[in-house]
Image (cartoon, grey):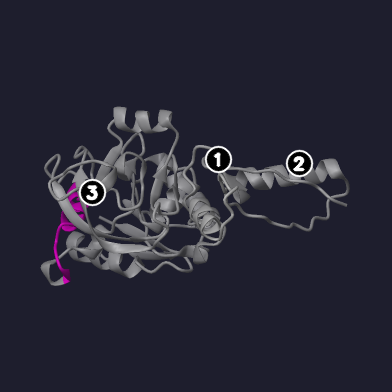
């Protein structure tokens, strides 16, 4: 499978996700600069974590209008999978490729620590290698990860199985006390209708092997590799 | 641009708490927002308003979570 990682000025997880993709899928991704208008023919586009444009105006707002994003939106419309991690998730919401918005953490602080997540829907190329309801532990590192959308949108996301992962307690407990950033209904990651686009705040690419402190993020990339193997 | 009513505004809340700590007891709520000054070369007010509204909708405000208001001055 071929993939592309979009690099924005201020991206800082582009190399991490490139290493994860390279090691697990066996193919190093093409790195595409945000100013390029063309993206090679690929099976997956990744918007990495970081602080594109220094989070000016709103996190992801400037990057959402980068030249390359016109092509990302067009590919996404054609059904090409797009994965947005952390700042990538913020960019996807700002670009209108996913609903809702990510605002300042409820506690106002930048939070960098491992969190527990419950895998809510395993019927996607990203989550297929996890058993449904599995609790995993991977890190978050953000100041603007508080997911917000109107009640109607939240109901639709839940009703249509578009919530990918939720923040939870160590035993899978869901509740306000288990959301580190105040996210509505503990939402940590969502799909688009076709489940080809996934945006999530936690960083699976940071925990892909025991030497990094854990490998709970690895099945994300194994699922991608399996689904896109050709 | 300000966060819509109903969208949690943790920064506004923290500012309100700080104002209370300073003894400003009459504060019952704070909404934090952003203020931008734009220099435009549109010929007339109507055209400037149209331009600004379009800029707000497409970039300056995220209308999922924010309201915006503007005034055109000569």
- Which residue is at the front of the view, A23 or A40? A23
User: Do the residues indicated by labels 3 and 1 lie within the same chain of the protein?
Assistant: no
Label 1, on which residue?
Answer: B4
Q: In this view, does A37 lie to the left or right of A44?
A: right
Judge whether B23 appears above or below A153 on screen: below
Disc 2, SS: helix
Which dot, 2 or 1, sits closer to the camera? 1
Q: Residues within 10 Å of mark 1 (few under 14, many from 20)?
A: some
Q: Does residue A37 appear in the picture of this structure? A: no
Marks 3 and 1, how far apart at CA: 41 Å
Label 3, on which residue?
Answer: A228
Identify the image quadrant of residue A105. bottom left
Q: Earlier in the sequence, mark 2 or mark 1?
A: 1
- Which residue is at the front of the view, A230 or A98? A98
Q: Give the magenta range.
A: A212-230
Q: Which numbered circle lies on residue B50? A: 2
Marks 3 and 2, how far apart at CA: 46 Å
Label the magenta part by its dominant secondary structure: helix
Q: Where is residue A46 in the image (x, y as percent from the top left)?
A: 35, 56
């Amino acid at each position: 499978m071929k993939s592309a990682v979009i690099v924005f000025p201020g991206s800082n997880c582009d190399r991490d996700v490139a290493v994860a993709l390279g090691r697990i899928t066996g193919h190093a991704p093409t790195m595409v600069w945000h100013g390029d208008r063309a993206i090679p023919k690929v099976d997956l586009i990744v918007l990495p974590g970081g602080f594109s444009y220094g989070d000016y105006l709103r996190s992801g707002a400037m990057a959402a209008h980068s030249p390359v994003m016109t092509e990302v939106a067009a590919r996404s419309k054609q059904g090409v999978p797009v994965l947005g991690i952390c700042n990538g998730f913020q960019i996807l919401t700002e670009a209108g490729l996913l609903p809702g918005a990510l605002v300042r953490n409820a506690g106002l602080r930048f939070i960098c620590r491992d969190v527990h997540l419950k895998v809510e829907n395993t019927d996607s190329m990203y989550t297929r290698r996890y058993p449904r309801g599995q609790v995993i532990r991977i890190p978050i590192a953000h100041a603007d990860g508080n997911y917000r959308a109107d009640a109607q949108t939240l109901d639709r996301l839940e009703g249509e199985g578009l919530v990918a992962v939720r923040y939870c307690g160590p035993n899978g407990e869901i509740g306000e006390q288990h959301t580190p950033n105040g996210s509505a209904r503990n939402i940590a990651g969502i799909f688009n209708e076709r489940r080809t686009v996934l945006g999530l705040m936690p960083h699976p690419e940071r925990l892909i092997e025991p030497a990094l402190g854990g490998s709970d993020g690895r099945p994300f990339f194994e699922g991608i590799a399996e689904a896109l193997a050709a | 641009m300000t966060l819509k009513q109903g969208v949690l505004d943790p920064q506004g809340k923290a500012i309100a708490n700080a104002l209370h700590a300073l003894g400003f007891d009459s504060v019952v709520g704070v909404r934090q927002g952003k203020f931008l000054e734009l220099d435009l070369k549109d010929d007339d007010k109507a055209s400037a308003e149209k331009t600004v509204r379009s800029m707000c909708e497409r970039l300056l405000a995220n209308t999922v979570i924010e309201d915006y208001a503007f005034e055109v001055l000569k």
